[in-house]
Image (cartoon, rainbow, N blue to C red):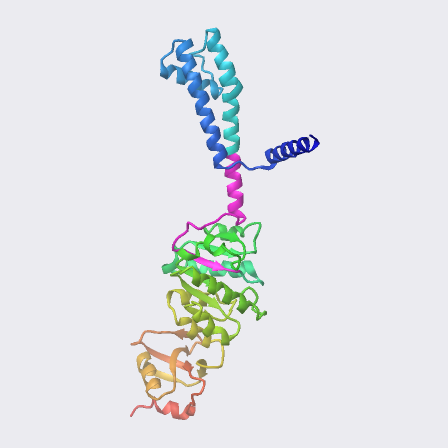
């Protein structure tokens, strides 16, 4: 007997606790709407039978009473009509209307808070850009630069952006939210998180390295790429790699492009999304190994840019990217037919390329 009483007391306590903390969902609202509809229907029937009203008048009286509007143009005058109004409308209807309004507002506020804090799934998103992980250092600035670059790129301007990250549990910075960026709080390596972020329906996926000073991040990236691969996603996948030796492994795991973490220039990521392969060229510009840029101090007058580029290539000197004019300004990609005045050239050359002397290079531009 004592055990039965204890069990009942536990259930009663749990029910009381649930009523204090439970956030009403759509099912609760649906139940209350059904109950309210039943109360309205019963009161309408009572008004038709006891007050001799037509159905529209009965419904009008019921609704003005339940919403406490009370125009007074129609009212119950018989005992049973007034008794029905007291029981059904004053005792139940008004309470239900108040509860529905309260629950609806609570549901809207809760949903908004969950969206802001990244606790809602965005698996209905399609053809979006999914950014997985966020940098450990200077996070807000980097994301702002990255999103700004994405929105300023015509090919990506209208693409929805979602971020999947354990950071920002209290919400993304307002500047990012104002640009329509949404996020989900969680780890991509957690079972089901990639699906809830719609990775299988994304158009682009960027897997960022959270800490470029920690080589272990490459292992996490490989795990994420493998998980994306099992979803059979058709997205273009760009992954960051700390160790160059992991590039081949990442590509075998499904990455379409692999790039080093370059936090100062998120433009490199964006360019590789819309022009695959350019990331390799851009990376080479930041290091001495492989193709790199040099400055060649040589004065040229009266040559067209097309003529300069052609002569350099024909003599295996390199590819001209731009020049410095007499005012000290660097001009890149001038018109091919434009005659220029240069005091130096900016060239892209190979790592093992041996350049001739300046005098010999100058001779290539000496009129025959």
In the rendered image, residue 210, in percent from the top left (x then y), is placed at: 55, 64
Tell me if residue 345 can be seen.
no
How many labels sit on residues? 0
In the rendered image, residue 296, in percent from the top left (x then y), is placed at: 43, 84
- Where does the magenta region start and end? 104-133
| Left or right, 344 with reference to 9 | left
Residue at (42, 64) in percent of width and height: 237
In the rendered image, residue 199, in percent from the top left (x then y), is placed at: 44, 57
Tell me if residue 246 can be seen.
yes
Determine the residue located farthest toward the right in the rendered image: 2
Relative to 39, is 219 above or below? below
Residue at (41, 16) in percent of width and height: 44
Residue at (34, 90) in percent of width and height: 364
Where residue 153 sits, quadrant-wise, is bottom left
Q: Is 121 inside the magenta-drawn segment?
A: yes
Q: Is 117 inside the magenta-drawn segment?
A: yes
Which part of the image, by quadrant, shows the N terminus?
Answer: top right
Determine the residue located farthest toward the top in the rendered image: 78
| Left or right, 20 with reference to 280 | right
Residue at (36, 16) in percent of width and height: 55
Where residue 349 sits, quadrant-wise, is bottom left
Relative to 211, is 21 above or below? above
Q: Nearer the viewer, residue 194 or 241?
A: 194
In the rendered image, residue 309, in percent from the top left (x then y), is placed at: 34, 81
Q: Nearer the viewer, residue 308 or 226?
A: 226
């Amino acid at each position: 007997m004592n055990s039965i009483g204890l069990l009942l007391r536990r259930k009663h306590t749990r029910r009381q606790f649930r009523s204090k903390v439970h956030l009403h969902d759509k099912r609760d609202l649906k139940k209350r709407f059904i109950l309210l509809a039943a109360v309205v229907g019963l009161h309408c029937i009572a008004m038709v039978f006891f007050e001799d009203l037509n159905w529209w008048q009965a419904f009008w009286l019921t609704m003005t009473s339940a919403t406490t509007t009370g125009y007074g143009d129609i009212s119950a005058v018989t005992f049973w009509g007034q008794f029905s109004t007291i029981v059904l409308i004053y005792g139940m209807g008004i309470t239900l209307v108040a509860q529905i309004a309260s629950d609806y507002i609570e549901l809207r506020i809760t949903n908004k808070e969950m969206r802001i804090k990244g606790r809602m799934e965005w698996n209905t998103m399609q053809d979006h850009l999914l950014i997985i992980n966020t940098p450990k250092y200077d996070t807000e600035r980097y994301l702002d630069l990255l999103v700004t670059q994405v929105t300023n790129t015509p090919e990506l301007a209208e693409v929805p952006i979602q971020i999947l990250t354990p950071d920002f549990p209290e919400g993304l910075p307002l500047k990012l939210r104002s640009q329509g960026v949404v996020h989900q709080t969680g780890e991509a390596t957690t079972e089901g998180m990639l699906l809830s972020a719609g990775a299988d329906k994304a158009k682009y996926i960027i897997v960022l390295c959270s800490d470029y000073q920690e080589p272990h991040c490459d292992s996490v990236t490989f795990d994420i790429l493998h998980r994306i691969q099992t979803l059979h996603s058709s997205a273009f996948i760009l992954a960051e790699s700390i160790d160059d030796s992991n590039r081949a492994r990442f590509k075998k795991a499904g990455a379409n492009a692999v790039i080093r973490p370059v936090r100062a220039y998120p433009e490199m990521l964006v360019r590789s999304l819309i022009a695959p392969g350019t990331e390799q060229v851009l990376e080479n510009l930041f290091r001495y190994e492989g193709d790199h840029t040099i400055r060649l101090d040589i004065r040229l007058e009266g040559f067209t840019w097309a003529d300069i580029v052609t002569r350099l290539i024909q003599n295996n000197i390199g590819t001209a990217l731009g020049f410095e004019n007499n005012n000290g300004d660097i001009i890149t990609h001038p018109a091919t037919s434009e005659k220029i005045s240069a005091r130096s050239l900016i060239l892209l050359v190979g790592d093992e390329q041996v350049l001739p002397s300046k005098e010999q290079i100058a001779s290539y531009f000496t009129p025959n």
